[in-house]
Amino acid sequence: MTVQDLSAGPVTATGTETRNVDGQAIAITVFSTVKWWGRMWLPLVFLYARLFPGSRSTLAKLSFIHFARWTLVKRIPDNGQPKRRLHYAHLFFESNFNGGWEEYIDAFSYILTAGMKRFWGSSYGFPGPLPTSPFKKYIRRNEIEASHFYSAYPAATTTMVLAALELEGRVAPLRARAPDMDDHAFATVWRQFLTEAQGCL
Amino acid sequence: MKGPNQAGQACALTVLTPIASGEEPDLRTYLEGLRDRPDGSPLARLGRTHFGRWVIVPHFVRERGQRREDNLGGPYLLFTTCFDEPLDTYLDELCAELAPEAGEIWGRCIGCPADAAGAELKRYLLHNQIKTGFFVAAYPDATVATVRAALDTRDRMIAFALRAQSLSPSELRSAFAAEFPG
């Protein structure tokens, strides 16, 4: 089989402030103010998501997210600062992803429509995930630019990392078997390896 | 089931600290300058950090329908990382490795110990930790070292596969053995 060089890389991170970007990686940081009932609702949503991994299968379809988190901030730690009581709880969301900001929000809205309502439905001003235009405006209003953002592997997209990890598992047995094979047997196994692992390259 | 701060072996750390009055402009300038340093981000010295960020939270936005503004009383510094477990030793490494920068960063926050390093800084960060509600990771069991090694293998394999197209069977086997020793 013929191998084409596809290592030119994916589309560069776009659509956000420079400081939210490190190579291919983009940071999104959003705080939204939660209605009174969200204080009880959101911990249940989090618990359900943690207890039932199947509920994350839709999230897994968003193959451009490295890591994401949702956190309910109900109180601020006391350091002796002047004001430390909050009138409302606040939902903190962060994501480390790759691609474009607009595409990210679009994919979130279209693929995670129900999940978005569960996570943000108790936040003031949440217009719903669809249509995406009002939702993007909502996120832009509540998003905060990072002052510093770091990725340990900035050239890699999530897809590249997952492909590399899968490839590593396929290469190991080939490495182990290669010394015991003659040239023609190895050439046959190599072609088979390429066929099976081409999706990882 | 792992705790809410964890997905597989990957952990989430979220720390929110109040910035001292008048310190926000200098802190912002310092943080924004980190990426331009010749030695790169200080977080690169923490080999277990996948992603990290510092964000200055000036205030919470007041949305339609919200009866009153939730005034923070001053800006806060948000620090988050995604890292390889466990938290305890990660914080030890952070408080040792980031000692040169910590005074310029958390030293501008209320309640930070005068000597922003070591056990005192660790206590301060833990005191201001916010528990995660839900944390997801695309590759929860892969450490930073594992990811980097796999990416390196993939890069070399792509280059090798291109080169291998013109090799004879005997050249192929010896070239593979040289590139990917068993």
Image (cartoon, rainbow, N blue to C red):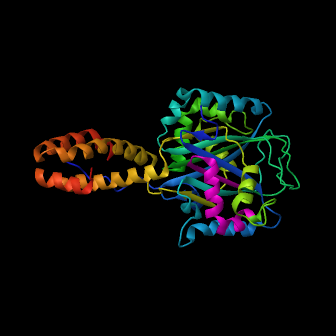
Q: Which picture quadrant has residue A159?
A: top left
The question of residue B103 being in magenta is answered with yes
Residue A30 makes an appearance in the image: yes
The answer to whether any part of residue A1 appears in the image is: no
Residue A153, image x and y in percent?
Answer: 47, 56
Quick one: which residue is furthest to the right in this view?
A82
B8 to B129, vertically: above or below: above
Q: Quadrant of the N terminus of chain B?
A: top right
x, y (%) of residue B33?
A: 62, 69
Asked whether B47 or A188 is in front, the reply is B47
- In the image, taking residue B64 as reference, residue A174 lies left or right, namely left
Q: Residue at x 74, y 68 (%)?
A: B25
How far across and how far down the image is residue B182, in percent? Answer: 27, 49
Looking at the image, residue B180 sits to the left or right of residue B64; the answer is left
Residue at image point 60% right, 67% down: B34
At 23% from the left and 49% from the top, the residue drawn is A3
Examine the structure image and report whether residue B129 is included in the region drawn in magenta. no
Report the residue at 66% width, 34% height from top. Answer: A119
Image spot of residue A81 (x, y percent): 86, 56
Q: Is residue A105 above or below residue B119?
A: above
Q: Quadrant of residue B152?
A: bottom left
Q: Nearer the viewer, residue A125 or B7?
A: B7
Q: Which is more toward the observer, B69 or B126?
A: B126
Image: magenta residue range: B78-106
Work out which residue is located at the far bottom of the displayed protein and give it: B38
Q: What secondary structure predominates along the stretch shown in magenta?
A: helix
